[in-house]
């Protein structure tokens, strides 16, 4: 069984050491979400790591879902380990992440997961299904990051970012950061997958959401930033309509991953 977690830790260690040399000391670790016990802390809850369980779940996951996001909104405070997050539906970022994860995991050929689930169902799935998060910029930020700043960090840190993404070998890349001002796909994170990670993710005809690498059997979702000012329900329905159409015409995508 491949040690995804151990290799991810090695990559983060090298990345963090290099950032320290550049005077950056607010590093936010990330990767496969922790699946150990949940503990209580001053401002809520956090999850602890169980590396054996996390490796087992990721190795066996029917679909490996990786959310690629920009950076951590630490609000000027110390960074925290993304993998220990338990989520909070009162924040749009986590609400959209959990809702969209629920739809992607539960939509199958012939069945689309409609926007009829409860918050409890979304939270339960988020806390039990093997998922991963990677921030392209590891130095924690605030409520927003400009395209130019994100582009700088992606280019500067591309060696480590590529290693981290390829190590996890996800099946669905949810690329959170579409912008009208970005070339090609309009998404720096999706562009990175094609330009640096050797994927050939091609936009599906008549669909702005789904990009498919047929040879590697991977898809990327050209998504908005998860805190975008959009209706969660409308956003969910648009995305799930597109994903449902895709797997109706490509049913082997969901049938061929570690079944």
Image (cartoon, helix red, strand yellow):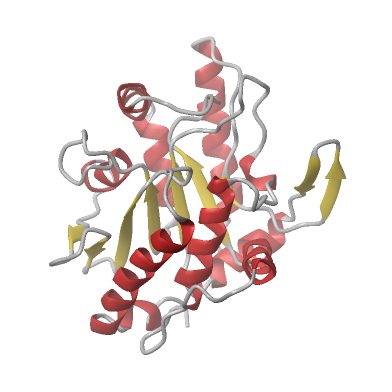
- In the depicted view, which residue is nearer to us: 232 or 185? 232
Q: Residue at x 59, y 32 (%)?
A: 28
Q: Is 196 placed left or right of 183 in the picture?
A: right
Count the labels in the image. 0
Determine which quarter of the picture holds residue 249.
Answer: bottom left
Q: Residue at x 56, y 38 (%)?
A: 10
Residue 40 in picture, x, y percent from top left: 86, 46
Determine whether 121 is above or below 21 in the image: below
Q: Quadrant of the N terminus?
A: bottom right
- In the depicted view, which residue is nearer to us: 96 or 253? 96
Q: Is 258 placed left or right of 192 in the picture?
A: right
Determine whether 24 is above or below 165 in the image: above
Q: Is 177 placed left or right of 59 in the picture?
A: left
Determine which quarter of the picture holds residue 199.
Answer: bottom left
Determine whether 227 is above or below 259 in the image: above
Residue 240 in picture, x, y percent from top left: 38, 70
Residue 24 in picture, x, y percent from top left: 54, 15
């Amino acid at each position: 069984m491949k040690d995804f977690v151990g290799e991810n830790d090695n990559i983060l260690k090298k990345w963090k050491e290099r950032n320290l040399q550049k005077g950056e000391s607010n590093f936010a670790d990330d990767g496969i979400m922790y699946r150990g016990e949940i503990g209580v802390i001053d401002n809520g809850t956090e999850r602890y790591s169980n590396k054996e369980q996390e490796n087992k779940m990721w190795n066996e996951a029917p679909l490996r879902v990786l959310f690629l996001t920009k950076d951590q909104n630490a609000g000027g405070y110390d960074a925290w380990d993304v993998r220990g997050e338990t989520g909070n539906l009162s924040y749009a970022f986590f609400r959209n992440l959990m809702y969209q994860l629920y739809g992607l995991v539960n939509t199958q050929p012939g069945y689309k997961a409609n926007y009829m689930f409860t918050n409890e169902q979304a939270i339960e799935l988020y806390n039990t299904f093997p998922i991963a998060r990677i921030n392209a910029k590891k130095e924690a930020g605030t409520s927003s990051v400009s395209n130019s700043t994100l582009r700088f960090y992606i280019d500067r840190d591309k060696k480590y970012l590529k290693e981290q993404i390829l190590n996890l070998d996800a099946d669905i890349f949810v690329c959170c950061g579409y912008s009208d001002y970005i070339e090609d796909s309009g998404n720096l994170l999706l562009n990175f997958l094609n330009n640096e990670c050797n994927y050939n993710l091609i936009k599906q005809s008549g669909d702005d959401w789904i990009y498919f690498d047929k040879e590697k059997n991977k898809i990327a979702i050209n998504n908005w930033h998860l805190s975008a000012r959009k209706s969660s329900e409308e956003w969910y329905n648009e995305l799930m309509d597109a994903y449902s159409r895709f797997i109706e015409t490509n049913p082997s995508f969901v049938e061929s991953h570690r079944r």
